[in-house]
Image (cartoon, coloured by chain):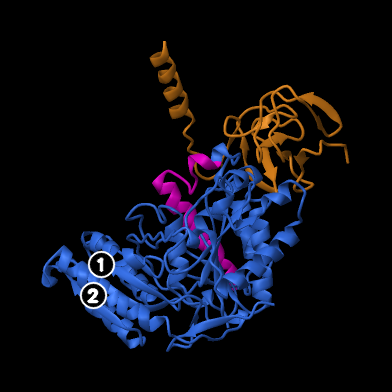
């Protein structure tokens, strides 16, 4: 068993993701399976990071069970979420596009 | 050890509250019902069905809810021209031994006259109910539901497993516990089927989840809100695995549908997804619709695990709010009853929080107010659905 950061939680030995037990800022060094890596994007509490390199098409495993499929290659220690994973059942709906459009429009209004 | 007492009803069940239900039978009577209840809103709770057209499910649900063990009297508020079978509903309530009155707005002389008459009726009933004796009650007489709402990446590792431990203790003590939302068990069907009391029930559990998967696929969305993704949940199956943890480890005794009463203690899955072709929209449009269905199956109270921070309570049956996320708890602590976020911070074990939830269930059953009750939350939501009766494999002897 390789060493992993106290801020990251492994729920089941078969998992290829780790759970952030606290918010971690972009660029902070994190320890993942014996490797010290800079966190490439900030993560909030409860979000997932890749425990090891994951290839496009691989199953994402959490709680020892499949929670979806990788849609692109995911580097060890990278954020695992809707931008690189899809459901094997129904598509995930987010407000992300609406938020980005709203914030862009708000910026235009300010200038 | 908390001593439980309850209000004994004619069907042998016992209530942990003695509420008056003010039930509107169409949306057009909602305002009048709300005004009738308002001066006594802590004890008189508004429930109802908004639709003008008949629906067997809604009729059955209203009959169950108006004869719920936490209900001591019922005032029905009808506009007068809606299709709801108020005659049958009133008969069912009267046969249950409860005081009941129907006010028809078009007959009473309109809004003001109906409100005045209704408020007077409520005041009289509350005087009577305040003198009702309580009798000894055992944990095994409790029916407890569980729901999660506003879930995030913390729910499945703190609040939900802790609620599951509380469920294990309640089931061991002989209580009936209900978990639900088959649409949020998509991906868990096989591990869940392994816990079924019989192979036939295992097939029924798998079939209920398969039905949910088909139903939601037709609608084009899973039971998954934008906030779930903000909170770190990526897919419906990830949300499902976290939600599934609420069920604990007990053997699954049966599969029921909304309004079916658990025949004895044990753990029951409630199939909330309608039967037949997709009609009437989403199975449960938000969390309170699920709480209402568990109440219709007799739930005295509900364990509600939330990560993002839901603030709702419920009409008729108290809701115990369990915060899964410690950052959310810091912001919304006044709305929460239990801080399961301590598990994430390493300050408490899942077992310790499970014990805390179990103890609180007994205290709330004995009369202690929950946070949402104290703040007057009494949400209620009932919409159109249709179900076939459960099959013989669903409740093995």
Mark linked to residue B109: none
Residue on which disc 1 sits: B25
Q: Position of residue B218 (x, y in %)?
A: 40, 48
Q: Residues within 10 Å of mark 1 (few under 14, many from 20)?
A: many
**Residue at figure coordinates x 63%, y 42% from the top left:** B327
Q: Residue at x 73, y 39 (%)?
A: A18
Which residues, given as a range, are shown in magenta? B200-228
Q: Is residue B385 magenta?
A: no
In three-dimensional space, the C-alpha distance between marks 1 and 2, rounded to whole angstroms, equals: 8 Å
Chain the render paints blue:
B
Tag count = 2
In the image, is A40 to the left or to the right of B309?
right
Palette colour of chain A? orange
Disc 1: which chain?
B
Q: Are marks 1 and 2 on the same chain?
A: yes
Residue at image point 69% right, 64% down = B356
The part of the image, by quadrant, that contains residue B110 is: bottom left
Residue under circle 2? B86
The image quadrant where one finds the C terminus of chain B is: bottom right
From this view, report whether residue A34 is shown above or below residue B380.
Answer: above
């Amino acid at each position: 068993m390789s060493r992993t950061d106290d801020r990251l939680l492994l729920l089941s030995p078969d998992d290829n993701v780790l759970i952030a037990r606290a918010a971690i800022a972009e660029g902070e060094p994190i320890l993942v399976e014996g490797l010290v890596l800079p966190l490439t994007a900030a993560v909030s509490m409860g979000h997932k990071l890749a425990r090891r390199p994951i290839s496009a098409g691989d199953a994402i495993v959490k709680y020892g069970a499949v929670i979806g499929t990788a849609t692109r290659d995911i580097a060890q220690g990278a954020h695992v979420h809707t931008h690189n994973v899809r459901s094997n059942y129904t598509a995930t709906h987010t407000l992300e596009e609406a938020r980005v459009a709203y914030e862009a429009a708000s910026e235009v209004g300010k200038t | 050890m908390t001593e439980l007492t309850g209000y004994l009803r004619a069907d042998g069940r016992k209530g942990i509250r003695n509420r008056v239900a003010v039930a509107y039978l169409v949306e057009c009577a909602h305002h009048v019902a709300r005004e009738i209840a308002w001066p006594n809103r802590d004890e008189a709770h508004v429930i109802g069905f908004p639709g003008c057209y008949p629906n067997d499910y809604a009729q059955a649900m209203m009959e169950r809810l108006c004869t719920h063990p936490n209900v001591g009297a019922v005032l029905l508020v009808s506009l007068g021209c809606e299709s709801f079978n108020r005659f049958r509903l009133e008969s069912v309530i009267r046969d249950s031994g409860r005081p009941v009155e129907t006010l028809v707005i078009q007959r009473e002389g309109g809004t003001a006259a109906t409100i005045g008459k209704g408020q007077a009726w409520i005041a009289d009933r509350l005087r009577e109910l305040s003198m009702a004796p309580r009798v000894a009650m055992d944990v095994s007489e409790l029916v407890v539901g569980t729901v999660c709402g506003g879930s995030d990446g913390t729910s499945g590792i703190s609040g939900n497993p802790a609620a599951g431990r509380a469920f294990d203790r309640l089931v061991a003590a002989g209580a009936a516990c209900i978990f639900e939302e088959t649409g949020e068990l998509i991906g868990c069907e096989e591990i869940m089927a392994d816990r079924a009391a019989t192979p036939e029930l295992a097939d029924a559990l798998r079939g209920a989840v398969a039905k949910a998967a088909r139903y939601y696929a037709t609608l084009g969305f899973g039971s998954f809100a934008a906030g779930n993704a903000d909170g770190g949940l990526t897919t419906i199956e990830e949300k499902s695995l976290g939600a599934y943890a609420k069920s604990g480890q007990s053997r699954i005794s049966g599969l029921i549908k909304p309004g079916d009463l658990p025949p004895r203690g044990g753990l029951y899955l409630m199939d909330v997804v309608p039967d037949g072709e997709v009609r009437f929209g989403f199975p449960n449009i938000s969390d309170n619709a699920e709480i209402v269905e568990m109440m219709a199956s007799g739930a005295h109270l509900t364990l509600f695990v939330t990560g993002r921070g839901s603030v709702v309570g419920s009409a008729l049956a108290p809701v115990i709010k369990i915060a899964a996320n410690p950052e959310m708890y810091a912001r919304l602590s006044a709305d929460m009853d239990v801080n399961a976020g301590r598990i994430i911070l390493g300050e408490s074990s899942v077992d310790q929080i499970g014990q805390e939830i179990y103890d609180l269930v007994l205290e709330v059953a004995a009369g202690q107010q929950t946070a949402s009750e104290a703040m007057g939350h009494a949400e209620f939501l009932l919409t159109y659905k249709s179900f076939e009766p459960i099959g013989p494999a669903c409740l093995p002897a």
